[in-house]
Image (cartoon, rainbow, N blue to C red):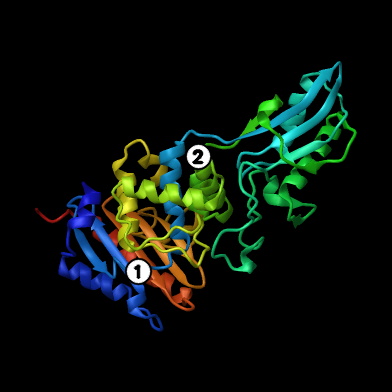
């Protein structure tokens, strides 16, 4: 198996290819000790290039690959998160005597159209008046708006506030709000008014026991496979963090970053991924506490590749060189264009590129610096991937 080969095979490489790959990684002003890279030939299972592959490095958005594999594994590609419209009280004619509850379960894509759908579902039940409030319930996740190791400046700038109930990524009247559940409740009240339903009391945030409420409607998120594709291709931080908390809530009953991270590490270990030197602090890779090794990254990709039911979704989530996502404007010429599928990563501490080349090579390059000269690191990664794309056209060496 490929994962086992990563654990046991030494860095035996065809010298000319190894020399070219090593030359590609030479970057002025970057400490070579802080660059880790590895390449696996999938047709032979051999390591054809390795440099500092076991080094624990800040991964930037490469971290999202760990969330992708875990979400696809434990939630499943077809899983969808529901957002419920609940009622506390009872219906008397056209009046709902009591409160309405908008309860979120972590859908990162919830938007106004979904609220309009919920309003239509309520009116279809003949309800025209609500005597109480609309209550926004985000209790499926904890109340932390950021993840461990984030800089204060990341809040709102790189991700909206984390919440199990958030509409339009917490943008209300052109600004990102601090209380997404309250904003969601207010937005639903507005959509109910537009649909002809009068809610007599103010919208608010709160916690409601779901078992004591009546389900009046629901909407569903895109599938996990679709969310993972958006997360990886566009490198979306908010989707990554929401999926991580969703993993924790669904598997451990705790909608926290810590619980989700524990599940991620277990899934990696169970898949045979080398976990020495890794630390999962968040889902997006924004955290300065995250650590991965190039060896663990190619092991992760290799594990996904060996899972036939998950591989099409995992592979399809990666940006395509010169065509989609964060690689749309990179590697745009032959032989790389369309041949490289990868996850990018960029913070002020790290620049990375990890993925596959024509299903012939699995590779990972992670470059660290304080700060990282990403404008020099990216061309080096592109040179590296281009060499692999060119080499992938050739037949594998005889075993």
Q: Which mark is residue 338?
A: none
Residue at image point 48% right, 66% down: 289
**Which residue is at a point 63% across and 52% down the rendered structure image?**
162
Mark 1 vs 2, N-terminal side: 2
Residue at 28%, 63% (x, y): give it: 38
Instruction: Tell me if residue 316 can be seen.
Output: no
Where is residue 170 drawn, in percent x and y?
71, 51
Residue lying furthest top:
93
User: Would you place residue 86 above or below residue 307 in this image?
Assistant: above
| Left or right side of 328 for 269 | left
Q: Residue at x 77, y 20 (%)?
A: 124
Residue ID for mark 2: 224
Left or right: residue 180 versus residue 322 is right
Q: Residues within 10 Å of mark 2 (few under 14, many from 20)?
A: many
* CA neighbours of label 1 inside 10 A, class few (<14), some (14 to 19), many (20+): some
Q: Secondary structure at mark 2?
A: helix
Q: Position of residue 298 (x, y in %)?
A: 31, 56
- Please tell me whether residue 288 is drawn above or below residue 77 in the rendered image: below
Marks 1 and 2, how far apart at CA: 33 Å
Label 1 sits on residue: 383
In depth, the one of 86 and 315 nearer the eye is 86
Tell me the mark number nearer the camera, choosing from 1 and 2: 2
Q: Nearer the viewer, residue 148 or 233?
A: 148
């Amino acid at each position: 198996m490929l994962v086992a080969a990563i654990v046991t095979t030494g860095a035996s490489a065809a010298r000319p290819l190894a020399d070219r790959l090593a030359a590609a990684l030479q970057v002025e002003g970057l400490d070579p000790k802080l660059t880790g890279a590895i390449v696996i030939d999938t047709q032979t299972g051999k390591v054809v290039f390795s440099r500092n592959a076991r080094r624990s490095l800040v991964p930037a958005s490469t971290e999202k690959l760990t969330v992708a594999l875990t979400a696809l594994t434990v939630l499943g590609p077809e899983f969808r998160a529901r957002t419920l419209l609940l009622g506390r009280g009872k219906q008397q004619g056209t009046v709902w005597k009591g409160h309405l509850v908008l309860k979120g379960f972590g859908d990162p894509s919830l938007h106004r159209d979904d609220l309009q759908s919920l309003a239509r579902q309520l009116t279809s039940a003949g309800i025209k008046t609500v005597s109480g409030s609309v209550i926004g319930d985000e209790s499926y996740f904890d109340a932390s708006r950021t993840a461990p190791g984030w800089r204060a400046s990341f809040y709102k700038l790189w991700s909206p506030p984390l919440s199990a109930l958030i509409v339009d990524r917490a943008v209300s009247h052109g600004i990102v709000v601090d209380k997404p559940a309250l904003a969601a409740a207010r937005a639903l009240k507005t959509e109910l008014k537009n649909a002809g339903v009068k809610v007599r009391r103010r919208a608010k945030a709160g916690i409601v026991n779901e078992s004591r409420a009546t389900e009046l409607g629901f909407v569903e998120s895109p599938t996990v496979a679709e969310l993972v594709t958006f997360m990886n291709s566009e490198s979306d931080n908010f989707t990554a963090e929401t999926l991580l908390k969703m993993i924790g809530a669904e598997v451990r009953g705790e909608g926290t970053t810590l619980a989700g991270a524990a599940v991620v590490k277990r899934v990696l270990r169970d898949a045979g991924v080398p976990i020495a030197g890794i630390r999962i602090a968040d889902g997006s890779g924004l955290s300065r506490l995250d650590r991965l090794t190039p060896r663990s990254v190619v092991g992760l990709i290799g594990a996904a590749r060996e899972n036939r039911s998950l591989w099409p979704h995992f592979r399809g989530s990666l940006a395509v060189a010169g065509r989609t996502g964060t690689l749309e404007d990179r590697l745009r010429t032959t032989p790389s264009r369309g041949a490289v599928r990868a996850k990018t990563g960029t913070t002020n501490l790290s620049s990375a590129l990890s993925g596959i080349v024509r299903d012939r090579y699995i590779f990972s390059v992670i470059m660290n610096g304080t700060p990282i000269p990403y404008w020099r690191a990216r061309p080096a990664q592109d040179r590296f991937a281009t060499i692999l794309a060119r080499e992938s056209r050739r037949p594998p060496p005889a075993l």
